[in-house]
Amino acid sequence: MLFLSVKKIYKIMGGDVNTFIQQIPLEYFIILSTVLFCLGVLGVLIRKNAIVILGCVELMLNSVNLLLAAFSAYKGDGNGQLLVFFIMVVAAAEVAVGLAIIAMMYRNTRSVDVSIFNKLRG
Amino acid sequence: MDQVLFFLVAFLAISSAVYFVFARNPLYAILSLIVTMFSIAGMYILLNAQFLGIVQIIVYTGAIMVLFLYILMMLNLNKEDESKKANLPKFIGIISVCILFVGMLGAYRGLSGKTTVADNIDHSVGLTKNLGRLLFNEYVLPFELASILILAGIVGAVLIGKKDL
């Protein structure tokens, strides 16, 4: 039902869902994914809060997912979109374990600042 | 029309991602990451990959981001932090990300900038019906293995999160 209404809204606005990927060059998606990925890398490099760093990793993962889905849609091949689906499954498990690790970190040190976790430094 | 829609959603995604990276308060940062996830779901729907769009909304904004907010609430971290720190690592980070960005843009130099689809491809490949047919024919084994992975993730999260085990 939701898909139908999206299509209907799109029709009212003067377009068709299928014309979208014929009007937008693939390179736009590549640039968008690059920008989002670089923002994720920037966040990992400059932030100190462990939760925000985990969110930045999610942002990078999402940008790559978007690029994979765009290539899949432009090729007309469903395998890429299924790969994105499996990546989402793995990401869900990864976030559950990562947030458990952060909660344990907080319980031991009363902080989620990663700059105090330098005990492994040689 | 399509271009306007694309640039609107892309602007929303990028601006909320910028706010996410630079916001001082972690709560507002995570909330703006939710906006980014929603706009990426919008991108999927614009790409006619409706199954992925709905899964993105359910899994990312519905489960993962709520988990983030829940941890933030439980640990009571909703305060301005990391105010006192050296500027040099930040500066080095920004410079290296700029180098990464320019390097990636340089890698795209050979692209024409006008690559679109051929007329004869299948546009309905991202619909739930077609993806489900593919998933339960060719990808049954990975699908079942994914359930084992989720189970292992649950066990691992409980094991790590429990106080004395």
Image (cartoon, rainbow, N blue to C red):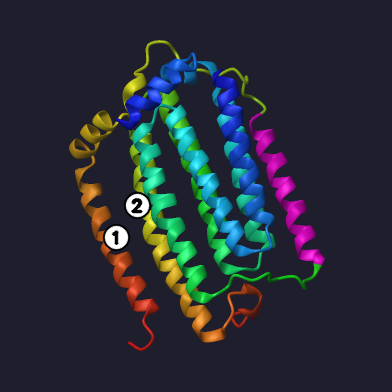
Please state the horizontal and vertical placement of residue B162, each as a whole percent of the image.
36, 81
Judging by the rendered image, the residue that carries numbered circle 1 is B150
Q: Which stretch is magenta?
A: B87-108
Judging by the rendered image, the residue that carries numbered circle 2 is A89
Magenta region, main secondary structure: helix
Residue at the extreme top: B119
Q: Is residue B78 above or below residue A31?
A: below
Please state the horizontal and vertical placement of residue A43, each as a whole percent of the image.
64, 57
Chain ID at mark 2: A
Viewer-nearest residue: B3 or A78: B3
Residue at the image point whose x is 21% and y is 51% from the top: B144
* Residue B142 relative to residue B8: left or right: left
Residue at the image point whose x is 40% and y is 67% from the top: A97
Quadrant, the N terminus of chain A: top left
Chain ID at mark 1: B
Please state the horizontal and vertical placement of residue A41, each as a whole percent of the image.
63, 53
Residue at the image point whose x is 40% and y is 37% from the top: B53
Magenta residue check for A24: no
Q: Disc 2 on helix, strand or loop?
A: helix
Have a look at marks 1 and 2 and say if they share a chain.
no
Callout 1 amino acid: Ile
Contact between marks 1 and 2 (CB within 8 A): the answer is yes
Callout 2 amino acid: Val
- Gap between marks 1 and 2, in whole Å? 8 Å
Magenta residue check for B101: yes
Q: Is residue A12 above or below residue A73?
A: above
